[in-house]
Amino acid sequence: MTELNELSERMDSNEEIIDNLIKKTTELEKQVMKIPEMNIPDYSATLDTIIKELADIKRDANKSDQLSLLNAIGAKLDSLPKSATRQFRFILFPETNQGQYYKIVFGRLIPWLLCFMVATYIFITGYKAIGVYRYNHDVRESMHYERAWLYLQQRAKKKMSAAMDEAYHKTADK
């Protein structure tokens, strides 16, 4: 009986392994289906011409003269048309290492940019608040001087009032 239990446990574990393998293969198949097809250019015509030219060179060339054969092959290859395409691309998002790119951008650059913006806003707001505070302080101080001046003017005698008027006119902005 114990052997049957062990055998059934083995079977269960084997079934789990097979299920995992099936899941992995289906995931891999899905990934393979997502890969776009690559267009491979058809070089069969140029290969045919190269083969024909090589056959002509082999017929014409002396078998002992391998250096001249290689030079002829190089000249024929150089005379074939070359397909060269130049591409200038500005890639905003990378084609490889997307995880590292997003980690750098969203994990470091954007938070630091936000921190600098908040710090700049706090600095500007603080600077304006200090200016308003100084202005209010100066206004309160000048109001205090004005009230003191008016108080003295109301309570002063004629000689003191004349001296205050003279001081006022001498210190006036001209």
Image (cartoon, helix red, strand yellow):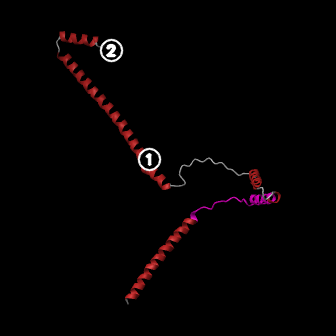
Q: Quadrant of the C terminus?
A: top left
Query: Residue flagged by tag 2: what amino acid is it?
Result: Asp
Tag nearer the camera, 2 or 1: 1
| Residue 54 inside the magenta-drawn segment | yes
The x and y percentages for residue 142 are 26, 23
Task: Please give the name of the residue rendered at 33% of the width and 36% of the height, measured from the top-left corner.
Answer: 126
Q: Could you tell me what secondary structure mostly forms the magenta stretch? A: helix
Q: Is residue 18 above or below residue 133?
A: below
Extreme residue toward the right, this view = 60
Q: Quadrant of the N terminus?
A: bottom left
Q: Which residues are magenta?
A: 33-57
Which of the numbered marks, if any, corresponds to residue 16?
none
Q: Secondary structure at mark 1?
A: helix
Task: Please give the name of the residue rendered at 33% of the width and 14% of the height, measured from the top-left corner.
Answer: 173
The x and y percentages for residue 15 are 46, 79
Crowd around label 1: few <14 · some 14–19 · many ≥20 (10 Å): few
| Residue 115 placement, left or right of 141 | right
Q: Earlier in the sequence, mark 2 or mark 1?
A: 1
Q: Is residue 95 above or below residue 122?
A: below
Determine the CA span between mark 2 and mark 1. 55 Å
Q: Nearer the viewer, residue 110 or 48?
A: 48
Task: Please give the name of the residue rendered at 21% of the width and 10% of the height, measured from the top-left corner.
Answer: 163
Which of the numbered marks, if any, corresponds to residue 109?
1
Query: Residue flagged by tag 1: what amino acid is it?
Result: Leu
Q: Nearer the viewer, residue 143 or 44?
A: 44
Q: Which residue is mark 2?
A: 173
The x and y percentages for residue 169 are 28, 11
